[in-house]
Amino acid sequence: MQQLNRLDLYREMVRIRQYESRILQEYHADKKPAWDIGAGLIPGEMHLSAGQEPAAVGVCAHLKQGDAITAPHRPHHFALAHGVDMKAMTAEIYGRTTGLCQGKGGHMHLFDPENHFSCSGIIAQGYPVACGQAMAMKRKGTDNVAVAVAGEGAANQGAFHESLNLAAVWNLPVVFVIEDNDWAISVPRSHSTATASNADRAAGYGMPGVRVEENDVEAIFEAAGAAIDRARAGEGPSLLEIHTLRLWGHFEGDAQAYRGAELDTVDERDPIPRYAAKLVELGELTEDQTESIAAEAAAEVDAAIAFAVDSPIPAPEDALLHVFA
């Protein structure tokens, strides 16, 4: 297991938040006065991960070159934490030729073969893919692992159950991660899932299941480290459910009326200022460091945005390039 470095965890969470906050700003900048989801430099839907940074940072702290991640439709935090190039990812979000997929995938379809990262807008789609990656790693005799990430709504999909069963039968080096942010779009988990914890479902497939509460990055780090070490040692799959927090809407433009009074408590549960306060109390973070870490992250994000904006838009005649015929 990797050694805990609190400052590194904090720095990466701030970096991701700075990115999501700037994308939020850029996305909304040219969609007014009348809301038009297809307008602007970043057209289409946008699902941002503010509040869920601890899940990505705590898990990815244990990954190394050759490990793989399949992420869901809310992917930016895991992409950045896993080492996907920020400039190339941003160019893809802007639909530019310098993007990860030459601008043809958009923010829900980010593919980075070098870092073995992928995501999809299809619920639970990454779970079977991660099993395939893990099977390849096992056959090659490496100690690499695959991590499959999805939301709690995906735990009711057939692909979730089939993947857990297959991974257990074949003893695959895969860790299944569920980000439970309480809402499957606008449906609370209590209206869709019979079990109080999806981690309990792991027992039905003969694998360990752990649920981490309170969006605690250090608890996530510990639980993910144990699961990933277990996979590397050839001891098979694990299921990790993380109770996290979606600070903003399911998508940008979501009025969130369904959340009711819960919205009043969201800001006080923001994991980044809470973790900063803890580090200050422990003497591991100062106010000057807080400001410098934020400034460093903002400068990196500024450079990525500028790169994307300055990159060319794909030519219409290139529409059939880089696709299956």
Image (tube, rainbow, N blue to C red):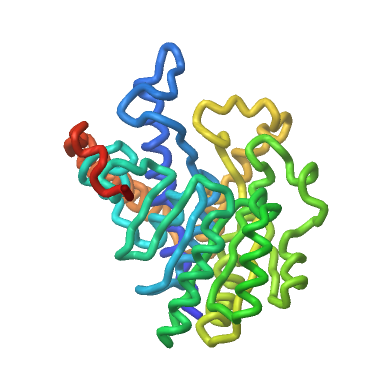
Count of labels in the image: 0
Looking at the image, residue 79 lies above or below residue 237: above
Quarter of the image where one finds residue 191: top right
Q: Position of residue 272 (x, y in %)?
A: 51, 50
Query: Which residue is at a point 37% across and 74% down the rendered structure image?
Result: 66
Q: Is residue 290 found left or right of 272 in the rendered image? A: left
Query: Which residue is at a point 44% across and 12% down the rendered structure image?
Result: 34
Residue extending furthest right?
194
Query: Which residue is at a point 35% across and 43% down the rendered structure image?
Result: 105
**Residue 126 shows in the view:** yes
Q: Position of residue 82 (x, y in %)?
A: 40, 62
Quarter of the image where one finds residue 308: top left
Quarter of the image where one finds residue 108: top left
Q: Position of residue 152 (x, y in %)?
A: 66, 52
**Residue 281 shows in the view:** no
Q: Is residue 268 found left or right of 306 in the rendered image? A: right
Q: Nearer the viewer, residue 15 or 79?
A: 79
Query: Which residue is at a point 53% across and 48% down the rendered structure image?
Result: 273
